[in-house]
Image: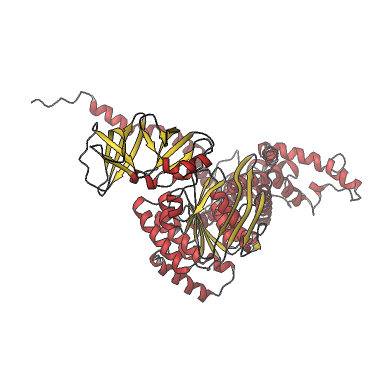
Amino acid sequence: METPQKPKGRKKVRWIEKNIKFLFVVPAIIYLLALLLFPAVFNLYASLHDWWIGRSPKFIGAENFIELFHDNRFINDVIVTFKFVIIAVTIEVGLGFLLALAATKITKGVQIFRVLFIFPIMVAPIAAGYMWRMLLHADYGVIPNLLARLGFPRVEVLSNPKLAFWGIILIDVWQWMPFVFLVTYAGLTALPKEPYEAALVDGASSWQIFRHITLPLISPILLTVTLLRFVEAFKVFDIIYITTGGGPGIMTESLSLYVYIQGLKFFNLGYAGCIAWVFFLIVMVLTTLYILRLRKEMKL
Amino acid sequence: MVKIHLEHVTKLFGKVVAVDDVTLTINEKEFMVLLGPSGCGKTTTLRIIAGLEEPTEGEVYIDDEPVTYLPPKDRDIAMVFQNYALYPHMKVYDNIAFPLRLRKYPKEEIDKMVKEVAEMLRIEELLDRMPKQLSGGEQQRVALARALIRRPKAFLLDEPLSNLDAKLRVMMRAELKRLQKELGVTTVYVTHDQAEAMTMADRIAIMKDGKIQQVGSPADVFNKPVNLFVAGFIGSPPMNFIECTATEKGDQFLLDAGEFQLDVTCFKDIIKKNATSSELVLGIRPDNVMVDRERKEGLVAKATVYVIEPLGSETIIDLAIGDNIIKARTLEVVDLKMGDEVWVGFDMERLHIFDKKTEKAII
């Protein structure tokens, strides 16, 4: 009996079937190369050179890096950025989670909260910055006027050395606390009901249920949302740029803003690249540590 | 050990009546099974005893103390849930130790008690595992261990065997019964499986549409069902029902089923006294149906063999009498085949007669 002949060209079709998957990844690879790898390598190259826009680069090795660690403005900005990240993220996660917990106890009207809370997230940070600049303006801002009627002194929050930083925190919390609320609320409502009933019968008080059931079960979500806010908060730029411009002085200047100032205001490409790299390393190390911890927690 | 008492308990979910005026006493050390089909209110009744639901009306007493509005933690009862409800983020050890930790027991004592209960339920080697690494049977044992460890006043079990395979279910049935008798804990067990109820219970409360239909020992509910529902729910295969009309023919009092007539003159007075009309339902368990090829004394109806179901130790014969199909069960070797003509009779001492309108048992 004759064995059936394999159709011609079958091998070719198979080769294409097997390898076509790589074709689909090409756009992603181009994106990665163009928008991530190229700027990173370019910045690294720039950071090793004395390079001002309009002039040709001159190799200076690690000189920019050495200078950076003696740069008081850089050290100030690192402190400001860290302070901002820690305070803003703590308030956002804490308050958002507390509100989400409270919302789970409410049986009616949570939908309204959820809709209202989506608005701040939808507003572009630039627009949010402008809006808050208006709201906080000492003369025609709604908030200082209301406070003045209650007997508080009329102050320009965003240019006051004592208040400007807290003004920035307020805006960031306004914009991002709802995000934490929405994510953790969704997480809380999706938790299984049975362990709660089991704990009630086992004799747990409300606090014990929160401590031993809710918190461990929600912690993967809480840690993830914290990580997202953490990485995002480190990059804070727009709201500071619009509201205080880093001032008064450099009291609210973040690292992102400093990179912008060095690169696009002073045209010092080499130094800006150097700050960007150090900044990137700091965020990467912290994020990696955080993710490692997260992985450990996730292993339920 | 305690007595649990429900007094006219009603529970509404919106307009739906889940539990309807239930009054029930569960005696000390008793194994009470709440039995009924899905949605009959048995689980809600259990949750009311646990304190997870508040009754809309009525009172719950534990040892004569009213506990209706007491939170679950103050009732000192333990519950095993249908899906076990283990804490997914805790190891088996911590799951079992949790009730004791809440009560701030010293560490050494907790350790000793966990190991004791783990040994009793043969789960010592599982203590380091997470719940999701366990099989259904293992999870069930852990849930039991968690319930047992604090020596509660009463056990509430909500269909704990329903997620297990048939073989394991039969095994755990016996083990649970032994455990309950050993510990002597008042137990309320919810199930829809009448075999579970019959094998384990001291008494069974059969529920339908939120109402208790009958409470009694397994033998009671099997032999003296109070209505059509109980008669049809208990027993496997279920009781045969044949609709018939009561007629008098001279001195004889007959049940006329169309295809045959059954002389029930001996029950005449009871039927006349209790029936609301002449429309009745004859009930007979498959074990009490007699079948023979020849017409002998006591065999009243002609039937055709519809199907034969051999089960090894016994055989179920489906018989067609006119439009009615009834089942007969026999332990003897059957030499019948489909389509054979036979004669059928009923054990008059085991006959049940129900009022068609009220569905209540007359005999």
Q: How many marks?
A: 0
- Residue A109 seen by the camera: yes
Q: Quadrant of residue B346?
A: top left
**Front in this rendered view, residue A144 or B199:** B199
Location of residue A243 in the rendering, given as x and y in whole percent from the top left corner: 75, 43
Name of the residue lying farthest toward the left: A1
Location of residue A66 in the rendering, given as x and y in whole percent from the top left corner: 58, 57
Name of the residue lying farthest toward the top: A8
Location of residue A254 in the rendering, given as x and y in whole percent from the top left corner: 67, 49
Task: From the viewer's perspective, tell me whether residue A15 is left or right of residue B196.
Answer: left
**Front in this rendered view, residue B19 or A243:** B19
Question: Where is B87 relative to A105, above or below?
Answer: below
**Front in this rendered view, residue B122 or A255:** B122
Location of residue B353 in the rendering, given as x and y in whole percent from the top left corner: 45, 41
**Front in this rendered view, residue B98 or A41:** B98
Q: Check the image and tell me how it is coloured.
A: secondary structure
Quadrant including the N terminus of chain B: bottom right
- Residue A212 seen by the camera: no
Q: Residue at x 39, y 62 (%)?
A: B175
Q: Residue at x 23, y 33 (%)?
A: B340
Q: Quadrant of residue A121?
A: top right
Task: From the viewer's perspective, tell me whether residue A165 is left or right of residue B359.
Answer: right
